[in-house]
Amino acid sequence: MKVNVNGEQQDYRTVWMEGSEVCMIDQPKLPHRFEIYRSKDYRETTDAIKNMIVRGAPAIGATAAYGMVQAALEFSGNDMEEFSNLIHEAAATLTSARPTAYDLFHAVDEIESKLRKAKSVSEALELARKAAKEYADKSAERCKKIGEAGEKFIKENSRILTHCNAGALACVDYGTALSPIRLAKYNGKEPFVFVDETRPRCQGSRLTSWELIQEEIDHSIIVDNAAGHFMQKGEIDIVIVGADRIAKNGDIANKIGTYEKAVLAKENGIPFYVAAPESTFDRRCATGADIAIEERGEDEVLSMFGIDENGNPVSIKISPGNSKARNPAFDVTPAKYITGIITENGILTYSHD
Amino acid sequence: MKVNVNGEQQDYRTVWMEGSEVCMIDQPKLPHRFEIYRSKDYRETTDAIKNMIVRGAPAIGATAAYGMVQAALEFSGNDMEEFSNLIHEAAATLTSARPTAYDLFHAVDEIESKLRKAKSVSEALELARKAAKEYADKSAERCKKIGEAGEKFIKENSRILTHCNAGALACVDYGTALSPIRLAKYNGKEPFVFVDETRPRCQGSRLTSWELIQEEIDHSIIVDNAAGHFMQKGEIDIVIVGADRIAKNGDIANKIGTYEKAVLAKENGIPFYVAAPESTFDRRCATGADIAIEERGEDEVLSMFGIDENGNPVSIKISPGNSKARNPAFDVTPAKYITGIITENGILTYSHD
């Protein structure tokens, strides 16, 4: 992704490795400050995942893979059994950071299994470095392919609605829903994006708008309430969102509010696309009804987090002291509202009965 | 409406008069502090309307009517022409407070025309007091009748979704959308309310939840993104909202997001009611397409207003410094999504072709 650093566009990934340091874009500081967080060892990398310095399943996976390299680098002896024990401990520590993130387990597992094939510590280290880099590269490559597959749905000056942040910041690079938009921009199509702010955590207004500013893609932030109005007025040509999980029948789970936008898109005859790598498909879920919806704490709804006039982080209360809230983090959009699912291997469609 | 003052439920209106003072619930201080704002003269009352100490068309109308009484009280002479001039000046001042509020003009006009019939200053004063009180009483009575007409749609333990604040705080008493819910509570039906927070100004989480807490009506605040999810899950039985304007064909304009909820209600087979006095009907608008939609400043979307941990008012930035926003304040819900319009004279339905 491009990042504007002191007036100059530079290429960045969300996470990478320099020497023994895992470097990542410090996401809680966005959109107000662009800083690189540098983690010195796998424990610090675990904390960075836990504290959401990095978020988004693919980005977390790559970060953990690099964390495994840090663990291997820590070892100074030659005993492969001792080495294995250390690696196993690091794997357990890293996977404890976000216990429900599937990519985290997958990445750590992949690196650990490669290390097991090594005959010496130095060979293991070499293998780990290579495997972690490959993991990140493949992740970025998949997102790029999603972009290439989806870009054809974006016409010259298309006006696109997106929800939440399915951007490069959630992945290693390119993003999922934002990847076709990025590539459309690179190809000179000058897309315009309506950015749902995406309450309660405002990943749209905080992160998606930040990414679009870096790429100089024209856009407006809107409150989630306004998406329907702009669809009705004919100001939105296409909707592209990400997905957290996809069931066998094509139902998808994504950030709360996705279902609302999908119903409104159908009602207004607007194509609604989901962009996600094939790893998002959960073959154990027959339909969306099998996907459990996490309800998070009330505070995200009752308060709002941001920065004050002096640039300091602050939380403000926007409801009575003793009120209650419900806070489902995701919702399920049935396949019948989805025009197609854009994957790294092309477009999937489902029969809509 | 009931207000819990030091643990005791007391009856309040949004605005009333005590001696020469116009008293009103200080709404910008809600939901964090319940305070009565006391205006000493019609100029201060004008400022109170301008600064939105009181908001909502019917409440503004009654406040201005009382402001006219304050103007009459200021006069010390006996000359009816001088008196008329003062009254006319006060009318011009009061109606300048919120130039687009129809009720404001209507109320001031009504009082001024009554004053013109008086033969002496003392008679005029008497007439003004009576007319202002009547204006407020009739306004409250209309809302009560809306409640009585709408309450029959609420069953025992009904779960109701509402949007924005169409409550007593926007009227003199009872409210429009909240009036049927209040009466259902008084009749022992124990309704449960899902309160859309209603970004960008959060009238749902700030005002509606405050009113419901006062009346001890069980409820949860939700982000606007979550309404569709709860409808899909079968957790919402009925939707009741207010209206800012109603066209001849039954299309309505209301707070941004209303259209989204209406489409979702229809999709999920949930009855969608609009509660509004007949004064909301604008016979000059044939359809919703004739209703102009105000776009407000970007800052309401790019920032959030609330109070910090020490109870001080604060505004926080929730988007990049140089991002843009669009902020339509209202949207139009076509009649085909509306089950019925609840007025003080009964239920109106429109054919849905």
Image (cartoon, coloured by chain):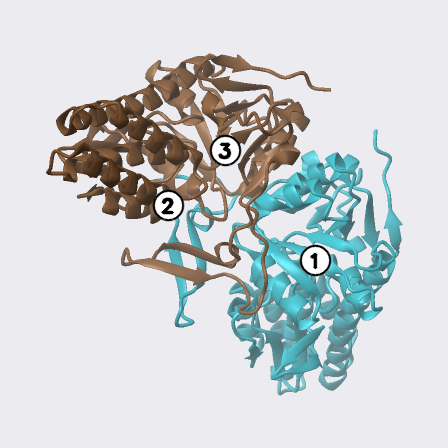
Chain colours: A brown, B cyan
Pointer 2 local density, CA inside 10 Å: few below 14, some 14–19, many at least 20: some
Residue A22 seen by the camera = no
* Occupied quadrant, residue A210: top left
Query: For mark 3, what is the residue?
Result: A244
- Element class at badge 1: strand
**Residue at left offset 63%, top offset 35%:** A290
| Residue type marked 2 | Ser
| Residue type marked 1 | Val
Q: Which chain carries label 3?
A: A
**Residue at left offset 25%, top offset 39%:** A85
Query: For mark 1, what is the residue?
Result: B193
Of A119 and B330, which appears nearest the observer? A119
Marks 2/1 in contact by CB < 8 Å: the verdict is: no
Q: Which chain carries label 1?
A: B
Of A296 and A320, which appears nearest the observer? A296
Marks 3/2 in contact by CB < 8 Å: the verdict is: no
- Element class at badge 3: loop
Residue B14: percent from the left, percent from the top?
Answer: 66, 72
* Occupied quadrant, residue A124: top left
Of A167 and B311, which appears nearest the observer? A167
Residue A70: percent from the left, percent from the top?
Answer: 20, 37
The vertical placement of A349 against A229, above or below, is above
In front: label 2 or label 1: 2
Query: For mark 2, what is the residue?
Result: A96
